[in-house]
Image (cartoon, rainbow, N blue to C red):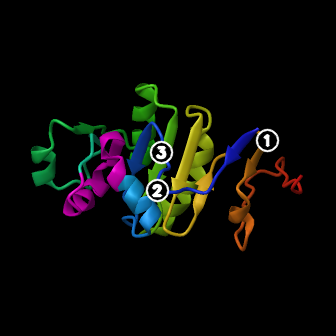
C-alpha cells in the first residue's frame, strides 16, 4: 500500500516542475524549488518569474507565448518550444519528463492567478496517472495527489483538511 507523507523541505522526486501559477511563497515548496534546481523543468511563463528569484531551470518548455523574447534568446539552449495548442504547458512538461523516463514528479506553482488554469491543472493530475507513477502537486496551501490504488496518508493531512474524491468508485476507508 502506497503511503503519502506530508511534504517537507526534504521531499524530492526525479523532477520538479514549476508551472506558471503563483510563485511558491510557503517555505516548503519554496525550499523544494531552491534545493532541486538541478531537477527543475520550468513551464515557459514561469521562467520569467523564476529568473527574477535568481533560480535556474534545467529545461524551459512550452509554446513560447508566455516567455519574453529576451529570455527565449538568452535561454535558447534550455528552451524547448512545442507549438501544440492541444495541451497546456504543464502537460508539455509532464510529457517531457515521461520521455526522459522520469516517473516521480513534484509540481509547484500550478494554482493561483487564473481559476481556469488552477482547475485544469488539478484535474489533469488524474490523466498523468496513466503515464507517470507518482505525481504530487504542492501549493502554498495544500497538497494534491493523484491516486488509483489503495493508499494511506500521514494523519496530519486529515486534521482540518479535506479529501476530494473525483470518482464515485472511490471511497474513504476508516483508519485501521
Q: Nearer the viewer, residue 167 or 135?
A: 135
Q: Where is mark 2, residue-wise? A: 9
- The mark nearer the N terminus, 1 or 3, is 3
Query: What range is drawn magenta here?
Result: 34-55
Element assignment for label 3: loop
Q: Is residue 130 left or right of residue 76?
A: right
Label placed on residue 12: 3
Is residue 88 visible in the rendered image? The answer is: no
**Observer-nearest of 137 and 168:** 137
> Mark 1 or mark 3: which is in front?
3
Neighbour tally class for label 3: few under 14, some 14-19, many 20 plus, Cα within 10 Å: some
For this view, does 171 lie left or right of residue 136? right
Q: Nearer the viewer, residue 151 or 46?
A: 151
Residue 32 position by quadrant: bottom left
Q: Residue at x 26, y 38 (%)?
A: 81
- Report if residue 41 is visible in the image: yes
What predominant SS class does the magenta segment belong to? Answer: helix
Q: Which residue is mark 1?
A: 150
Amino acid at each position: 500500500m502506497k503511503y503519502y507523507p506530508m511534504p517537507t523541505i526534504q521531499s524530492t522526486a526525479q523532477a520538479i516542475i514549476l508551472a506558471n501559477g503563483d510563485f511558491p511563497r510557503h517555505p516548503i515548496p519554496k525550499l523544494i524549488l531552491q534545493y532541486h534546481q538541478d531537477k527543475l523543468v520550468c513551464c515557459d511563463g514561469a521562467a520569467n518569474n523564476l529568473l527574477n528569484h535568481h533560480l535556474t531551470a534545467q529545461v524551459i518548455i512550452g509554446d513560447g507565448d508566455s516567455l519574453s523574447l529576451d529570455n527565449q534568446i538568452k535561454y535558447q539552449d534550455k528552451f524547448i518550444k512545442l507549438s501544440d495548442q492541444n495541451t497546456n504547458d504543464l502537460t508539455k512538461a509532464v510529457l517531457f519528463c515521461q520521455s526522459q523516463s522520469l516517473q516521480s514528479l513534484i509540481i509547484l506553482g500550478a494554482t493561483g492567478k487564473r481559476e481556469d488554469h488552477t482547475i485544469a491543472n488539478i484535474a489533469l493530475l488524474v490523466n498523468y496517472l496513466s503515464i507517470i507513477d507518482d505525481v504530487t502537486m504542492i501549493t502554498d496551501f495544500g497538497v494534491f495527489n493523484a491516486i488509483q490504488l489503495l493508499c494511506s496518508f500521514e494523519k496530519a493531512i486529515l486534521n482540518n483538511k479535506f479529501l476530494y474524491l473525483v470518482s464515485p468508485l472511490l471511497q474513504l476507508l476508516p483508519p485501521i
